Amino acid sequence: MIRITPSLLAADFWRLGEMVPGVEEAGADGLHLDLMDGCFVPNLTFGPMVVEALRPHTKLTFDAHLMVRSAQDYFPLLAPHCSLVSVHPETDPHLHRTLSALRDRGLEAGVALNPSTPPSVLDYVLELVDSVLIMTVNPGFGGQKFLPAMLPKIREARRKLDATGRRVPIVVDGGIDVSTAPLCVEAGATVLVAGTSVFRHQGGIAAGIRTLREAAGSSVSGLEA
Ligand code: DX5
Ligand code: ZN
């Protein structure tokens, strides 16, 4: 079962209030929220106050992707609103402690990996990991080109996670569209984050989600055949 969680980064920020219920009506499985602090990545987006303001306007689960230096500072502010919070180990020497802190707050604990970060960072924290996000572009901006070199990394992460005997989702994030989604699904991804290909789809958000789901599904049936 493939989940599609559109990234609000590509939405029209002038009309955020109507975009969020619109994504739910369009058939999304959750909403991906990119929090950037201008330090860990060279861009700034929005913070927990905006997440809180959006919360009453949809039943969709919120997945927060923290591209920030001090991720733990945000946990108490995000915990009432989000289901999953993903942190970057590149900015954190204490990943084990951070993942434990997420779970202690009742959040699912996600690890997000930059393109140059190997999946081996997961090795000694696997039992604390509820989700692995593999960046398929460099973090910070939407609309970038998918990095095909991430496909073997998705496969390697899939092997590691399957060996735990638990069902841990692999999220792919960046440059996901109808041509790259099937490649990621075939490699072992189960959650597709898509900004540009959903919010900027010529036929509208619903058409963006539908075509992505069809593309991802065709890869699964291809594998089963
Ligand atoms: C980039 C973000 C992504 C971004 C993806 O740092 O993590 O979630 O919104 O955007 P697209 O789908 O346009 O590549
Ligand atoms: Zn993201």
Image: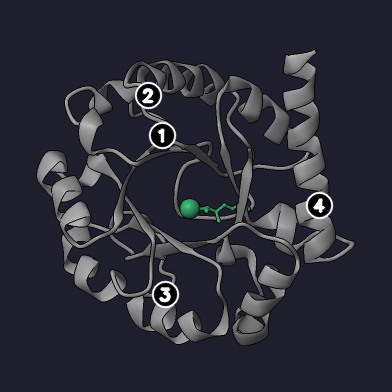
As shown in the figure, which amino acid type bears the numbered disc 2?
Leu
Disc 2 vs disc 3: which is toward the camera?
2
Residue that label 1 marks:
168
Which of pointers 1 and 3 lies earlier in the amino acid sequence? 3
Q: Are marks 1 and 3 in contact (CB under 8 Å)?
A: no
State left or right for residue 181 relative to residue 103. right
Residue that label 3 marks:
46
As shown in the figure, which amino acid type bears the numbered disc 3?
Phe
Corner quadrant of residue 183: top right
**Dot 3: what SS?**
loop
State left or right for residue 175 relative to residue 172. right
State left or right for residue 112 relative to residue 182. left
Q: CA distance from mark 2 to mark 4?
A: 28 Å
**Dot 1: what SS?**
loop
Disc 1 vs disc 3: which is toward the camera?
1
Which of pointers 1 and 2 lies earlier in the amino acid sequence? 2
Residue that label 2 marks:
161
- Report the quarter where the C terminus lies: top right
Disc 3 vs disc 4: which is toward the camera?
4
As shown in the figure, which amino acid type bears the numbered disc 4?
Arg
Q: Are marks 1 and 2 in contact (CB under 8 Å)?
A: yes
Res 201 seen here: yes
Res 180 seen here: no
Which of pointers 2 and 4 lies earlier in the amino acid sequence? 2
Residue that label 4 marks:
210
Corner quadrant of residue 11: bottom right
